[in-house]
Amino acid sequence: MPRKSHLYDYHKDHAKLTEFSGFEMPIWYSSIVDEHMAVRNSAGLFDVSHMGRVSIEGKGANDFISYILTTNPSRVRNGRAFYSVICNEKGGIIDDVITNKFSESRYSMVINAGNREKDLAWLERISRNYDVSLVDYSDTSALIAFQGPLAPEIMQKLVNENLSELNRFSFFECKVNGERCLLSRTGYTGEDGYEITIFDTPLDRPQRALSIWTKLLDLGRSFGVLPCGLGARDSLRLEAGMCLYGQDIDEKTTPIEASLESTVTLDEREFVGKAVIEGQMKNGTEKRRVTFSMIDQGIPRHGFEILFSGRNVGLVTSGTFSPLLKRGIGMGYVPSPLSFHGQKLAIQIRDSSKISEIVPVPFYDTAKFGHKRVT
């Protein structure tokens, strides 16, 4: 039986549901396109309680985090969140995670829903060598994402603190609508917005989460705010060029092959997978993840062949029709010599070969959309 999130009863009454990573989750409420455009133009509300949440505390927390992540946490200020990856000894990506640094002895981590048990087993095994305590609080808290250019204005109505002082990838503990929360200026859409961890909210008592969810929808209704499902979450993250674990990255790909060098801090410290990753940064890789935009009409999908000079050189890992750009976009892996911007590649879409071009991400004009937009 699929697991249920804290807001399952709301979704059951208002959304079309689907199974995702072992959970029964909303795929859409009104339509994927409407929800996608609400986030780009106003704001949208997502239930992401299926994601795992674990606290890491103790004298050895900093050394532990430093060893399991490719990013050096000592270079991150307290009160900041950072995106990184957990690798195995071969440099393969076990998971991509967001880590919150409260102090050198206190961290929390958000992990992918489908990796909860695997990640926790890995973390617990390595933690035996460190003075740390791990607590999985996924089922005693809820997690809501509120994303879009109007999210700060609307969220401010529920928070006493001045949210203009909360910079991107920063967080603090506060009351949201009177409930104890961790408010983080992060997200998976490319837009400005927040992820709200609602504490003291077990699965059988979801009222705190439901009160914040309904209050944000009520406050945002006149602004065009919509509840959003997994369909819009996927098209939004792809427009922003963000990876989906299990499709775009996995234990058979390294952060260098995945074009995630920004997550790697190479210094004197040791971390899991360092030898392989350091070698690839020095010597290059055979394949690279690229992002492409369709020139010809056609919608690339997961598993479609990528062609160059008529021969198969890779596979599409994620693809969709961009509601914002009105054309097909996608990502996949190709031989490194073909991975430069401007390179033309063909995508085999059913019986036809359609031309695409490798482009940088995000796919949209950052002056008009996304968290860097000019307001």
Image: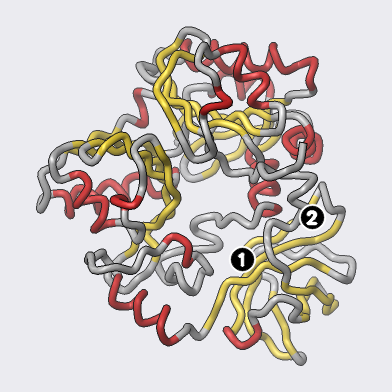
**Residue displayed at 27% across by 70% down:** 89
Query: In the displayed structure, does residue 254 sit left or right of residue 104?
Result: right
Q: Secondary structure at mark 2?
A: strand
Q: Quadrant of residue 80?
A: top left
Q: How many marks?
A: 2
For this rendering, which residue is in front, 210 or 370?
A: 370
Residue 154's place in the image compared with 362, above or below, is: above
Q: Quadrant of residue 15?
A: top right
In the picture of the structure, the residue carrying the numbered disc 1 is 317
Query: In the displayed structure, does residue 296 sit left or right of residue 334?
Result: right
- Residue 371's tag is none
Q: Which kind of residue does numbered mark 1 sit on?
A: Thr
Q: Quadrant of residue 8?
A: top right
- Label 1 crowd (10 A; few <14 / some 14-19 / many >=20): many
Q: Secondary structure at mark 1?
A: strand
- Residue 321's tag is 2
Tell me the quarter of the image containing the N terminus. Answer: top left
Q: Residue 285: x, y in percent?
A: 48, 83
Residue 180's place in the image compared with 38, above or below, is: above
**Residue displayed at 42% across by 70% down:** 254
Q: Residue 279: x, y in percent?
A: 35, 82
**Residue displayed at 65% across by 35% down:** 229
How much space separates mark 1 and mark 2, taking CA atoms?
14 Å
Q: Residue 347: x, y in percent?
A: 76, 75
For this rendering, which residue is in front, 220 or 309?
A: 220
For this rendering, which residue is in front, 164 or 85?
A: 164
